[in-house]
Image (cartoon, rainbow, N blue to C red):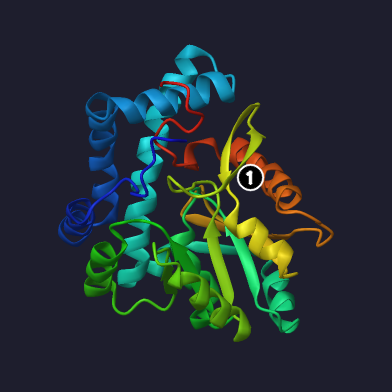
Amino acid sequence: MANWQGKSRGSVLGLRIYVFFIKTFGLYFSYFVLLFVAAYFIVFSFSSTKSTFYLFRKRLNYSTFLAALNVYKSYFTFGKIQLDKFAIATGSKHKYSFEFDGIGNIQNLLKQGKGGILLTAHIGNFNLAKQFFDDQINPASVNLVMSDFEHQQIKNYLESVTGKASLKTIVLKDDLSHIFEMRKVLDRNELLVFAADRYLKGSKTYTAEFLGKETQFPQGPFKLAVRNAIPVLFVHIMREKNFHYHFYARPATGNEKTGKELLKLYLENLETMVRKYPYQWYNYYDFWNDFN
């Protein structure tokens, strides 16, 4: 996982293009344009294509033909999810349906008064969390822990298009000030959300097997939860057919004694999701460090 430097695929320019197409041509035509954009990325983003092909061919054991086809589907689905995010935020929520599968687990977690940790991954579309939480819990109690170097620039642009975001953010910083912010969040009985399938260079990691091969994962979210007896849920928001989104929230057992035990449960849950939604796991780099 050494090739990830804390910056997610995408930029303000890319976001502007998504918004331009939706506003100018509408959602359906924007999907049509994505057919060509996905093909472009296969050719001109070779390192991402190589890594994604490896996922399907070696880790999910698809045939060569199906692995190549699914690289294209992955790029296409990633684009659709970005378009959906803007469409929903700018007035087209009525086009979509939402399924709440385990939302009661979040409500029960908040009743415990300890705060909580939601562990997700770079899969599906957790950016739609506000749309799920609006009618169920107060979105202002949800705090996304972010490590993307471009977060502020992108966040400012998103707010200029969709209005003030309801989900708060805590940015990982070199001076470790984020630790105090996290403590305040938990003291207020709020939720911390970690995408725990990536780590930044220099951070402490665990080595664990995922999809049949060992790689590294951040220690921080798992140690924080276990050492402070903070209740944990594994959460994902996945796109399904016919403009349908499916929210999953599953509790950890609560009996984990170490961070690595909690990581094992997290990876079991994540592997289930990746196998069920193989086009929606978006780690477009050398995740298993095979190409160095």
Whether residue 131 is visible here, answered yes or no, is no
Q: Nearer the viewer, residue 134 or 170?
A: 170
- Which residue is drawn at the image coordinates 55% and 19% (left, top)? 58
- Which residue is drawn at the image coordinates 22% and 28% (left, top)? 44
Q: In the picture shown, does residue 156 fall above or below 215?
A: below
Q: Nearer the viewer, residue 39 or 151?
A: 151
Q: Quadrant of residue 286?
A: top left
Q: Nearer the viewer, residue 99 or 268?
A: 268
Q: Secondary structure at mark 1?
A: helix
| 4 left or right of 107 in image | left
In percent of width and height, residue 186 lies at 61, 79
| 88 left or right of 266 in image | left
In percent of width and height, residue 175 lies at 40, 67
In percent of width and height, residue 48 lies at 35, 31
- Which residue is drawn at the image coordinates 40% and 34% (left, top)? 285
| 228 left or right of 270 in image | right
User: Can you name the residue that lies furthest to the top here?
Assistant: 64
Q: Which residue is mark 1?
A: 270
Q: In the picture shown, does residue 253 fall above or below 203?
A: below
Mark 1 neighbour class, 10 Å CA radius: few under 14, some 14 to 19, many 20 or more: many
- Which residue is drawn at the image coordinates 73% and 52% (left, top)? 262
Q: In the picture shown, does residue 46 fall above or below 270?
A: above
Amino acid type, callout 1: Leu
Q: Quadrant of residue 220?
A: bottom right
Quarter of the C terminus within the rendering: top left
User: Can you name the residue that lies furthest to the front here?
Assistant: 175
